[in-house]
Image: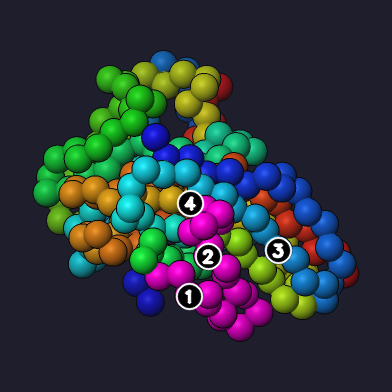
Amino acid sequence: EPEVTQTPSHQVTQMGQEVILRCVPISNHLYFYWYRQILGQKVEFLVSFYNNEISEKSEIFDDQFSVERPDGSNFTLKIRSTKLEDSAMYFCASSDGGIKDTQYFGPGTRLTVL
Amino acid sequence: AQKVTQAQTEISVVEKEDVTLDCVYETRDTTYYLFWYKQPPSGELVFLIRRNSFDEQNEISGRYSWNFQKSTSSFNFTITASQVVDSAVYFCALSEDRNYGQNFVFGPGTRLSVLP
C-alpha cells in the first residue's frame, strides 16, 4: 500500500541553524501539506501546496518557513533560522486532490531545537 | 472560522469495555468533511474515517462505529469491546470545502488508555 515517507525521523539542531525536512508524498497525489504538533498539543496546519505553489498557509507559516518540490518526488519544508519554539513533530501529508480527498500522513519528523 | 471540540481530554477504560469519544464541530459551510485520526504511542497519524456533510448515515467498521448528527454538530466515535492496542490519542478533524487543497482543523484530541 502506498504511503507517505519522511526523513529524518528525528533532527536535533542548534538555535539559529537552518533545517530541511523531507517528505516523499504518495506518487499520484497532487496536493501536499505540512502540519506541526508541539508536544502534547493538537496538530496545526502550516501550509498546503498544489501545482508548484503554495495554495494556503497559516499564520504560523511566516517568512522563516518555505516549501519546495525540487523534483518529481520530494516535498521539503525549510526553516531558515530555527527557534526554540520550533521544536515539534512535523507531519507531511498528501491527497489526491479535489473536494472529496483524504489526507494521508507520514510518520513525522521530530525536530528538537537546542 | 471552523472549530472542533473534543471535551474529553483523557479516558481510561478496562479492556472489553465500550467507549465513546465525543466530537463537536462548528462551521458556516454547508459542504464540509469530518475525519477521525488515531495517533498511537509511536506518533504517526493513522486515518480512520472520512464523512461528508451530506451523508448522515452511521458507519460501522469492525469494532469501530461513528455517529454523525448534523442537528447537534457532532461526530462521535465508539469503540466496542476495547483492546489494549486501542490505546492512543484520537483526533477529530474538520475540513471545509476549498478550491485548492484543504485546510484541516484538528480537535485537541482525546487520550484513550485501555487497561488490561
Task: Identify the mark nearer the N-term, 4 or 2.
Answer: 2
Amino acid found under the numbered disc labelled 3: Thr
Q: Residue furthest bottom?
A: B62
Question: Residue B67: horizontal and vertical position, in percent?
Answer: 57, 68
Q: CA distance from mark 1 to mark 4?
A: 18 Å
Q: CA distance from mark 1 to mark 2?
A: 7 Å
Q: CA distance from mark 4 to mark 2?
A: 13 Å
Closer mark to the observer between disc 1 and disc 3: 1
Dividing the image into 4 quarters, which one contains the N terminus of chain A? bottom left
Q: Residue furthest front?
A: B71
Mark 4 element type: strand
Q: CA distance from mark 4 to mark 3?
A: 16 Å
Q: Which mark is residue B57?
A: 1
Q: Are marks 4 and 3 on the same chain?
A: yes
Task: Identify the mark nearer the N-term, 4 or 3.
Answer: 3
How would you rate the neighbour count of disc 3 (Cα within 10 Å): few for under 14, some for 14-19, many for 20 or more? some
User: In the shown orientation, is residue A29 left or right of residue A10?
Assistant: left
Asked whether disc 4 touches disc 2, contact meaning CB atoms under 8 Å apart, the reply is no
Q: Are marks 1 and 4 on the same chain?
A: yes
How would you rate the neighbour count of disc 4 (Cα within 10 Å): few for under 14, some for 14-19, many for 20 or more? many
Asked whether disc 1 touches disc 2, contact meaning CB atoms under 8 Å apart, the reply is yes
The residue at the point 33 percent across, 53 percent down is B30
**Residue position marked by numbered label 3 in the rendering:** B20
Height in image: B7 above or below A1?
A: above
Q: Which mark is residue B68?
A: 2
Q: Which residues are magenta?
A: B55-74
